[in-house]
Amino acid sequence: MTPGRFISLEGGEGAGKSTQATRLAAALGERGIETLVTREPGGSEGAEAIRALLMQGEVTRWSPHAEALLFAAARADHVEKRINPAIGAGTWVICDRFIDSSRAYQGLAGGIDDAAILALHGFGSRGLLPDRTFVLEMGVAEGAERAAGRDGAAADRFAARGEGFHQDVAQAFRRFAADEPGRIRLIDATGAPQVVTERLLASLADLLP
Ligand code: TMP
């Protein structure tokens, strides 16, 4: 059995990650590839329970360090219960956010050392990295507008942070893409959804069977 591939979608708020995860799965399905679409934080029963702790409440509910541990714990459960078994069964996993969100939000924007975030990931999830990571790029203001239109008034603990924080997140993702060009690709997320999906497929061509 050939193992499946692991693809993550990253980016700021409102960039269209979940829409593109579904669209990419459909496009891969047309090529005869079995897929699992999942998300973080969450994706397994235990990780979804941790998600509720992370997303609700005051912005200051968790310290950056506690927050980083909760994300790493959620990810460890998700990787062990869902992602690794699926990859092992030959399924391609498409994950809406993964480790690079922790590196961007808790790390560069949150003030925690990148090496510390990666050490937690090494312990919790054996350092599992995606075969390809797409960063969906959209202006912070445009993304925030789209996210507000989708989520209504109930902005979560992260969306409620200021524009400066989200600019730092965007800059972090660009830096990761520059540092790891083999794995991480910047994708223009503006325009019609089908055009964005075509950009993803073009940037996945080298991995397609
Ligand atoms: P989303 O479901 O709208 O993408 O929201 C998840 C939020 O959690 C988003 O604001 C980014 C944040 N987040 C982190 O801060 N660190 C992480 O490791 C992950 C996966 C998400």
Image (tube, rainbow, N blue to C red):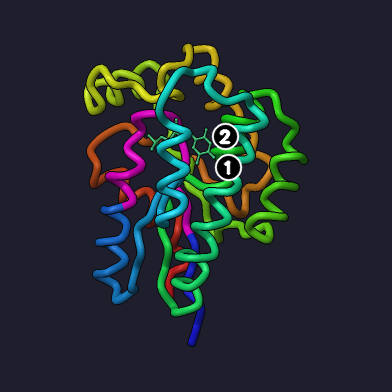
Q: Position of residue 117 (x, y in %)?
A: 69, 41
Q: Residue, x 52% and y 46% (percent of image)?
A: 185
Quarter of the image containing the C terminus? bottom left
Q: Residue 17's x, y, as percent?
A: 36, 42
Q: Mark 1 — residue? A: 100
Residue 78: x %, y % from top left: 49, 57
**Which amino acid does the dot numbered 2 rest on?**
Phe
Horizontal side of residue 68 vs 24, given as left or right: right
**Residue 136 lies within the magenta run:** no
The residue lying toward the viewer, choosing from 180 and 82, is 82
Label 2 neighbour load within 10 Å: few <14, some 14-19, many 20+: many
Q: Residue at x 62, y 54 (%)?
A: 182
In the figure, 83 relative to 52: above or below? below
For disc 2, the marked residue is 173
What residue lies at 55% left-to-right and 61% top-to-bottom?
131
Q: Please give the range of residues in magenta.
A: 7-21
Is any atom of residue 28 visible in this view?
Answer: yes
